[in-house]
Amino acid sequence: MGFFDKKKCSICGGDAGRVFVKKLEDGLLCKECTGKLSPWFTGRRHSSVAEIEEQLAYREANKAAVAVFSPTRTWGGNTKVYLDEAAGKFIVTKSSNWRDENPDVIAVSDVLGVQMEAEEHRWEEKYRDSEGKEVSYNPPRFRGEVDYYVEISVNTTYFDEIRFKLNDRTISDVDFATREATVRIADDLKATLMGNREAVLDAAAAAAAPKMAAQCKTCGATTTPTATGCCEYCGCPL
């Protein structure tokens, strides 16, 4: 197949183009189909056509989860984390119109950990002398900037990490107020996601635990509590 020959997408059968065509283990992927994959997915080159088809089916089904997603908490700037506390789900997205973007809706119970990483950049500050040469101060002076990144480790089928920059603009090393505020946001995000994760897991464990027989104080019957903690005979709370 020559460079100018048309290449067909192995998923949709359309023209894969020559510039934006992406390779799979056993096929090709066009720009349109590539754009439908999860933005956190990084294993495209090592995926088969069948695996990509499975992911695209999941992404299509994800639209229904996005439609009912109702956020109650938000963190971040250009990239935001939205949490639906009632549903125990969250999304991470750069789009303000995120319902059209179809962000992955992830269960908080699938969160394995949340970490913040500071990327610092330092350099020596110099000045120009009377001859126009760059000269170090005495003693040397240094400047710096920092960006904060959040990494959310997750247990999902198509990706295991979500990494994004928390601050919108690089922060000066002497802007202590902004640095402290950004760290507080990261700490709150971590505490909330991990706290919700533990709550969901504890609730699931309690629901799966064997029900112990108890005597109903209303009707006096010995009963096994229902899923809502009521007497199976008279329906009163135990």
Image: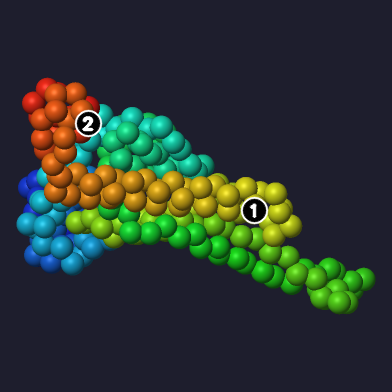
Question: Of residues 108 and 232, which is closer to you in this image?
Answer: 232
28 or 189: nearer the eye? Answer: 189
Q: Which residue is drawn at 82% across and 75% down?
A: 140
Amino acid beneath label 1: Arg
Q: Which of 215 and 203 is in front in this view?
A: 215
Q: Residue at x 35, y 36 (%)?
A: 84
Whether 150 is drawn above or below 137: the answer is above
Instruction: Give x and y (percent) for residue 123.
Output: 69, 70
Q: Mark 2 = which residue?
A: 238
Query: Quadrant where the N terminus lies?
Result: bottom left
Give the quarter of the figure containing the C terminus: top left
Query: Which percent across, then down, holds residue 77?
Result: 51, 42
Q: Name the residue under label 1.
A: 179
Query: CB under 8 Å between callouts 1 and 2?
Result: no
Q: How crowded is mark 1: few (under 14 residues within 10 Å), some or many (20 or more)?
A: some
Helix, strand or loop at disc 2?
A: loop
Q: What element carries label 1?
A: helix
Q: Which residue lies furthest to the front in this view?
A: 220
N-terminal-most mark, 1 or 2: 1
User: Which quadrant of the view contains residue 99?
Assistant: top left
Percent of width and height locating residue 204: 22, 47
Q: Where is residue 222 in the image (x, y as percent from the top left)?
A: 10, 35
Q: Badge 2: how crowded within 10 Å, few (<14), some, or many (20+)? A: some
The image quadrant of residue 151 is bottom left
Quarter of the figure with residue 45: bottom left
